[in-house]
Image (spheres, rainbow, N blue to C red):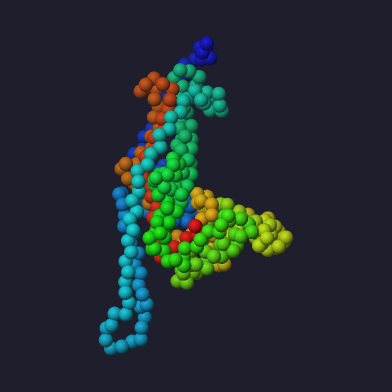
């Protein structure tokens, strides 16, 4: 027997909502740009790519030479180009309104056959999907592989792109650091981080936007090592005799280079790069962007609600010779 037989019918309020094109941009931006590596300022964001964009980098040789009466070109100019082309992605989610009858939102839904998700829950659903998209984006920024499994196949990430450039010889051999056998741990993390910094070209060392990008596990190992809890650490009491209590999610550096922690990065991989050389591309104002909450009751008489989100994403770097890979 249905537990709804004595329930009074509530007035149905249709919650179908559609945002398209630039009107969806606010919600798309909240989803994509909340990925940790982007939100914390680790990448240069190109937010209005309609289809694809050419990333151009200009490099010159030594410009200054002793003066003379003649005009003698004394330097060469090298223009490098790489393409960033965001791919179209989507979210399709369906949930049943009955799933929420007994939770804390029930009193706002009305107890009847015409019950609908309350407006604030539809807002919550958009926010929830945005958070999930942000988490997936963070993973794909680094581990993305269009030939990979679900969850990482949205677009090719930096790990795949940089590995391909290294294999092609675009990254100098001295800037390709072999990962330690057996993986990173608190006992070897300082040594391995130092290897990456040592491989940074002299022209890049000291640049304001130079970062050493590492994963969460490597960051934890580094904190442990500095706290004295590793054979290669600072001793039993660590920094300022505080063990690991000295660190409270503040900034980390190693040998003069700022560390950027990337939750989406694979274990045992690290990269040194300028933020201005790493790009995330999307089309916040694209006409193809869609954020839709669709109440199915008036369409198929079901008690389902569907959530649709369509957007574009991609990453790319500018100059391969300015990267250091630890893999």
Relative vertical location of residue 66 with respect to residue 314 in this rendering, above or below: below
Relative vertical location of residue 13 with respect to residue 216 in this rendering, above or below: above
Q: Residue 142 appears at what percent x and percent y?
A: 46, 51
Q: Residue at x 38, y 39 (%)?
A: 90
Residue, far left: 70
Say left or right for 80 vs 124. Answer: left
Front residue (pair 190, 65):
190
Residue 128 is at least partly visible in this image: yes
Q: Residue 4 appears at what percent x and percent y?
A: 51, 15
Front residue (pair 56, 192):
192
Residue, far bottom: 69
Q: Residue at x 39, y 63 (%)?
A: 169
Q: Residue 312 appears at what percent x and percent y?
A: 36, 45
Residue 261 is at least partly visible in this image: no
Q: Residue at x 47, y 16 (%)?
A: 9
Front residue (pair 6, 229):
229
Q: Image quarter for residue 295? A: top left
Say left or right for 182 vs 159. Answer: right
Number of marks present in the image shown: 0
Q: Residue at x 39, y 46 (%)?
A: 146
Relative vertical location of residue 131 with respect to residue 167 in this rendering, above or below: above
Q: Residue 157 appears at what percent x and percent y?
A: 42, 51
Front residue (pair 55, 214):
214
């Amino acid at each position: 027997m249905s537990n709804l037989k004595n329930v009074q019918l509530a007035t149905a309020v249709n919650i179908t909502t559609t945002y398209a094109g630039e009107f969806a941009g606010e919600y798309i931006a909240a989803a994509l740009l909340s990925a940790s590596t982007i939100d914390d300022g680790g990448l240069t964001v190109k937010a209005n790519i309609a289809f694809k964009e050419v990333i151009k980098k200009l490099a010159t040789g030594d410009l200054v030479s002793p003066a003379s009466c003649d005009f003698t070109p004394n330097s060469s100019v090298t223009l490098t180009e790489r393409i960033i082309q965001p791919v179209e992605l989507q979210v399709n989610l369906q949930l049943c309104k009955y799933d929420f009858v007994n939770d804390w939102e029930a009193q706002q839904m009305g107890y009847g056959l015409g019950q609908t998700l309350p407006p604030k829950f539809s807002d919550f659903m958009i926010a929830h999907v945005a958070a999930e998209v942000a988490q997936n984006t963070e993973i794909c920024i680094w581990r993305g592989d269009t030939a990979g499994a679900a969850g990482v196949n949205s677009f090719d990430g930096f790990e795949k792109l940089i590995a391909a450039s290294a294999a092609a010889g675009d990254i100098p051999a001295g800037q390709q650091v072999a990962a330690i056998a057996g993986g990173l741990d608190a006992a070897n993390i300082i040594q391995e981080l130092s290897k990456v910094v040592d491989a940074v070209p002299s022209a890049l060392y000291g640049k304001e936007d130079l970062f050493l990008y590492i994963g969460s596990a490597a960051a934890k190992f580094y904190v442990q090592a500095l706290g004295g809890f590793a054979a290669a650490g600072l001793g039993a009491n660590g920094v300022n005799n505080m063990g690991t209590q000295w660190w409270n999610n503040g900034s980390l550096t190693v040998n003069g280079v700022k560390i950027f922690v990337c939750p989406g990065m694979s274990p045992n991989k690290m990269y040194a790069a300028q933020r201005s050389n790493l790009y995330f591309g999307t089309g916040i104002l694209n006409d193809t962007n869609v954020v839709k909450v669709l109440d199915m009751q008036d369409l198929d008489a079901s008690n389902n609600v569907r959530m649709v989100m369509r957007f574009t994403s991609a990453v790319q770097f500018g100059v391969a010779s300015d990267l250091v890979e630890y893999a």
